[in-house]
Image (tube, grey):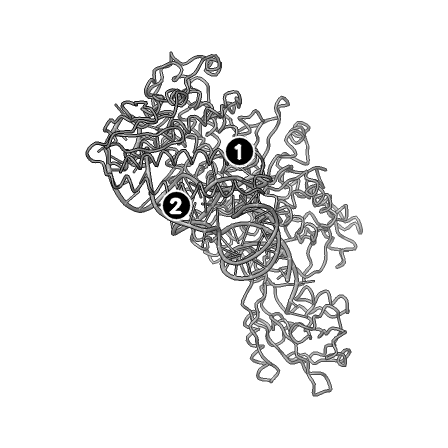
Amino acid sequence: MSELATKYSFKDIEEKWYQQWEQNKFFHAQVNTDKKPYVIVIPPPNVTGILHMGHALNNTIQDILIRYKKMNGNESLWMPGTDHAGIATQNVVERKLAKENLTRQDVGREKFLKRVWEWKQEYGSTIIRQLKSLGCACDWDRTRFTMDEGYSDAVLEVFVQLYKKDRIYRGNYIINWCPRCQTALSDEEAPHKDLNGSLYYMKYPIKDSEEYVVVATTRPETMLGDTAVAVNPKDERYKHLIGQTVILPLMDREIPIISDDFVDPEFGTGAVKVTPAHDPNDYQMGKRHDLEFINVMHPDASMNENAGEYAGQDRFQARKEIIEDLTRRELFLKVESHNNAVGHCYRCHSVVEPYLSKQWFVKMKPLSLPAIEAVKDGRIKFHPQRWTKVYLNWMENIQDWCISRQIWWGHRLPVYYCADCHDEEDKKGIVVSKQRPNKCPDCGGTKLVQDEDVLDTWFSSWLWPFATFGWPFSQDQKQEELKYFYPTDVLVTAPEIIFFWVARMIMSGFEFMGDIPFKDVYIHGTVRDETGRKMSKSLGNSIDPLEIIEEFGTDALRFSIISLTSVGQDVYLSKDKFEAGRNFANKIWNASRFILMNLDKDKIADDVDEYLKGEKLDLAEAWILSCFYSSLKDINKALSRYRLNEAANLIYEFFWHQFCDYYIELAKLNIKEKNIQCVLYSILEKILRVVHPFMPFITEEIWYKVNPDAGSIMQQSWPDLREELIDGSLEKDMKELVIDSTVETRKLRSENNIKPKEKKSISVFVEDANKKAALQKYEEYLKILAKIEDIEFRDKNESPGLTFVSAVTSHAVISMDVGEQIDKEGELKKVEQQISELVDHISRKDKLLANENYVKNAPAQVVEKEKNSRDELQKKMEELKKIKDACL
RNA sequence: GGGCGCGUGGCACAGUUGGUUAGAGCACCUCCCUUACAAGGAGGGGGUCGUAGGUUCGAGUCCUACCGCGCCCACCA
């Protein structure tokens, strides 16, 4: 057999194998009607993205599933790609421009876009390269970008279709406006954060009266746009004021006092200033009462010409000055501290301004209905299940989606306005079409101007599960692919984007494909640092996966992060946690190296499984095969339930603590024996296959040494579960007769300072011939594992010599002659301690067993087990008492 | 205001439908460079499972309340 290098060096193998796989197109999937497809579409990272631990976790999970399913005979397809990330990418390029003291307006739309594309050409594939270093088995030939020609066509197609169905409309509404990015945002893009704000109380004088009404606000600067004061109609305090007029301070505008049920008499003073152009509630009130809408801000949130003398000031500066001016006029009452939730731009974190503007919206209610049904009836399942509720809650309260963005980088709206006849209400002179129309259908005019806005990035990514397959089609062949691969199997993602993306993909799936986009949604946790903070660039607490790969290896990174991630729970990482994976890789390497060193090719049967089936195996061989298959059974079960951490830990446990700690040690004695050779080979080549999805590189490297002619491990099948080789009672015997005795014997050595090298003999006291026979079957194993020269079986009633120390197992008393150095007193103390613990334990059991209700109600099996266990303890105690007597 | 998750040895976590004395890892202590592996091997100490009740023969596990931490959603200005 070929040998492995003495020292495991991941650097020598990881890159090498990835290139091989890619060159050989092992990641490629195609329509194959003989096989069941297994499909995952990658959550497309932003082109501006650089790999962080969240990606590492997300993509490792997907890669494991893809590789596992491929080995299970599926046509596994992992569809990769990137997202153009409108605002984020535009910001990056704008920042670059800023270094040249330029704005995008300076260079103009066309040139700016050219620069973004250049940036994309240069840096846009960084994340793809990084995913490759993670080992991702994506079908790179299919890599898509949300602004590819074909993909863009899908986006426009969808816009046109929805418009024609009257699902898209344009209108003036209060939207979330980011003054920094200068664009509208959807509700999801403006998450609310609690701020320690202030509530300002201001006096508004009532016309022709000495009275004034006090209103409270968190944003005093909006008062410049007030067009009413509202009170609750039932509020006795203000009833007399309804219908009167107020003089708006600073602006000297006359505004009415209106009554509206919306007003909560309990909050503030019970009187509300109404600014219809700057607050969503006020907007509604404005509509109801036919108020004037006065916009007092520029798009950058500085005050505009409607703000009187405050024009030109920034909103926060204006706030300050307005308060000062009101104070001067004795119209400012007080300020209270007040926590309230304020929207922030999810890209630049600026405080978002509710802003009245003309935008495009998608009517969501009709789209949501089938998406709600599909989750309710289980056609789509969330893992863990609890996210179902979060999803349904959002879906059932869905709001219309603002999809127009005032930026340049993205899909420009396929909307054209006639320069001659387009009117403000969009009643005529508007054409929605994928192609630029030649003339206006209403007036025949030929000057058609395209809408300046682009679409929300998510308006393209919500089509990902089918647009990546070429929808809408021009060629029949590709349509076949969609038919074969859609719906996909599972979507693996983080909770943050359930609303942004997952929910919308489900809606678009039904709307355009008439079917679910995926069957399962696996929501994994968030990656946090060891103090529980989310890992993020801005906090500076992230661990760079590439550094971990450099220091510990990709396999180590993957194995560590997976074994730490229980389903849906957040992952707490620190650098040292990656040592576990590295150590395991090292263990796999060394164990494999040892086996390969000792295997004789001639002794390994051509068909090992077939050979082993016919052979009468020794206990150790049968045992380790049983262990392997019972582990495999559990691993399969864990994988089918997305419990990847459980699977990883089962693998670790079997490989390290059963195979290496016990079996390999036992095999050493007669390692050249054919059966042992076959078992070592059989388990090694199978465990490599099982480990492969988790640690693809090291397993491939070793695989080629174990099986030089079989081709890549990527193309092997997952081991069949051979239940007939699982032998529970053998596993139990091995545990009780060998492992427990080994541990006890080692303890005797350790407690009595006997050097590992020193060969010792033990005496084993057994009750009867049966016990003796049982132990004798395993005698050799105990000798090897505990480094025992000889075992002398003695009658239970004999007593060991005065220089013996003893331990009690469930089957025997093990004694060892430690000669002169015996610590009689210590020994006595130890035994007494054990006895007193047993007394407690037994009395607890006695109490339990004496409880009628227990015996009556508990399942017979449980009671039986309890009785047996009590008897065993009793026996053990008797043995210990004898040992104690011997000590005295 | 609603919803969700978490609180288990020094640290960070497992614990599957309630059933022996609650488990591995890291760290710690002792011994060992035993010819696969010191990134290793052998042994060991350490937890009244957040608190208080309840259901049950039996609760880390189910129920209720409370405390603490974190997250998500929501138009009380």
Say what amino acid the circle numbered 2 marks. Lys
Say what amino acid the circle numbered 1 marks. Glu
Q: Residue at x 68, y 38 (%)?
A: A379
| Foreground of the two, A432 or A202 | A202
Q: Chain of mark 2?
A: A
Instruction: Give the numbered dot on residue A575.
Output: 2
**Position of residue A447 measured from the top left corner of the image (x, y, whole percent):** 72, 51
SS type, badge 1: helix
Residue pointed to by mark 1: A864
On screen, residue A319 versus residue A512, left or right, reads: left
Q: Residue at x 44, y 14 (%)?
A: A616
The quarter holding residue A800 reads top left
| Foreground of the two, A624 or A235 | A624
Q: Is residue A215 visible?
A: yes
Up the image or down, A249 lies above or below A63; here it is: below
Q: Quadrant of the C terminus of chain A?
A: top left
